[in-house]
Amino acid sequence: MADAGIEDRHRIDGMLTSRQLSGIDPAKFSQFVGMNPRVTGDLDYSTAGFTTQYAAMLIASGACEMVACVYGRNIPGTMHDFSGVSVYDLDCGLVNANAVFAMGWSRHMAKYGTSEEALGHVVIAAHKHAALNPIAAWPEPLTMEQYLADDFVLWPFRGYDIARVTAGAVAVILARADIARDLAKPPVYLHAVGRQQATRAYENDEHLLCFGMRNAASQVFSAAGMTTRDIDLLCISDACSAAVMHTLENYGFCGEGESGEFVKNGAIELGGAIPVNPHGGQLGEGYLVGWLHHAELVRQLRGEAGLRQISDARVGQYCATGRHRLDFLSSIFVCE
Amino acid sequence: MSLQISETQDDEYRAFLARGEVRHQRCSACCYFRPPSSWVCPECLSEEWSWVAVSGEGTVEAFVWYLQSFDERCTKVPYNVALVCLDEGVRVMGNVNALAFGELRAGQRVVADIGAGFQGRVTLNFRPA
């Protein structure tokens, strides 16, 4: 609230929290902090992009003027346990969301001949960016030799390819545009959204390669009146390194099957063709299911990102993949 | 979340497996093959179906190897889970047994290997053809 310049907390008339495996109840949290919003809510599956889009819907409908989206967790295993705890099919032992991504990456390697080093470039970029971020959990530099020497845990993923759970908290406040313009800082606008479910899953060809993202991509770009060339930074929900690759391909930042070549020469690093997760993302900064990505988008677009600031960043895009590759979501943010 | 959306139909599917038969539902109205088992056809919404024997043969499209355990009920590492496209054109998940880590490839031809799954109940798994 201090950052936004909101002095009276009772101006916030919507409270959304997120309970993705862990998290807080929105009514209880409102009670703790002495607020009595018109609307409280959370979503059954609610990483940051789903919650912020929900907040925008509440504002667009007139139900709320100013919505706080709040996430926090401090769970056992912080900075040690792998993320993605979930059970899909106990009969064959298909557990953990990253295993599904790992299967998808095996498909990518087989179909396009992608090398083992490809994912290494994503992880190395994440660590390089994290080194410029004072709150990052994994700022240590990483070489390709160290990456390749790491043990496989979910082949074709090594330990470095999978985000580990971290403790932390993020609050993002969305307000009606005319209200936001009168607050302390230049507003960052949620400019366009794209969504696609892939509920038929394996009945779809190439479900594992996330082709469903392409529908979310065409929606968000057409709603924004933009193309990939307009995007100054890309924040990808990276519970594992392969999520970055599928997003680059299916949103059109590179061609189908070409992500391995695309990331080889620094294209996704600061100063590259499309900087991805300049804060380090979930693989470098910390794993808060996309919430830290939203904080980074706001900071970058306001020019407050310090050593990792992208010069003249005006347009930022968030992309996420949820659950068993059932949900694809994107938001484009702009700061004028 | 379970990939099987109907317990009743899943029970019937497993009763066939227990007799050594791989059968999947085929819609009586539009002939659409499913797994996952369900009381309704996702293509035409018909609630009529028959259980049709399939070959149990297929091709591995994708797979993962668990080299460490990610769940206390699945500790027999290493093991793999593969997405198998059956010759009838439907996809199912299962273990490809009788292979060591590194021996499985996309495109591997497999045949049904029915046995006890991680939960102890009868499960459709595979072995190399």
Image (cartoon, coloured by chain):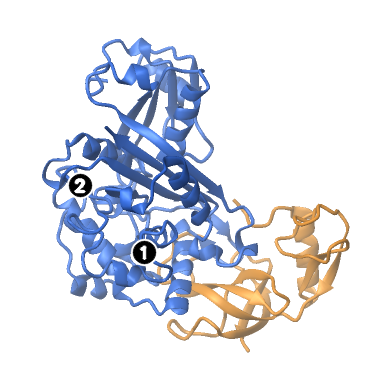
Chain colours: A blue, B orange
Q: Amino acid at mark 1?
A: Cys
On the image, the x and y values in percent for residue B1 come to: 59, 50
On the image, the x and y values in percent for residue B117 come to: 62, 69
Q: Chain of mark 1?
A: A
Quarter of the image for residue A24 reads: top left
On the image, the x and y values in percent for residue A275 come to: 25, 54
The verdict on a common chain for dots 1 and 2 is yes
Q: Residue at x 21, y 34 (%)?
A: A302
Front position in the image: A104 or A179: A179
On the image, the x and y values in percent for residue B68 come to: 40, 68
Q: Which residue is mark 1?
A: A254
Total labels: the figure holds: 2
- Image position of A231 with respect to A179: above or below: below
Q: Residue at x 68, y 80 (%)?
A: B112
Is residue A20 among what the camera can see?
A: no
Q: Which residue is mark 2?
A: A136
Front position in the image: B107 or A35: B107
Which mark is nearer the camera, 1 or 2? Answer: 1
Please state if A287 lies on the left or on the right of A50 as rendered: left
Q: Residue at x 28, y 27 (%)?
A: A187
Query: Is label 1 in a helix, a strand or a loop?
Result: loop
10 Å crowding of disc 1: few (<14), some (14-19), many (20+): some
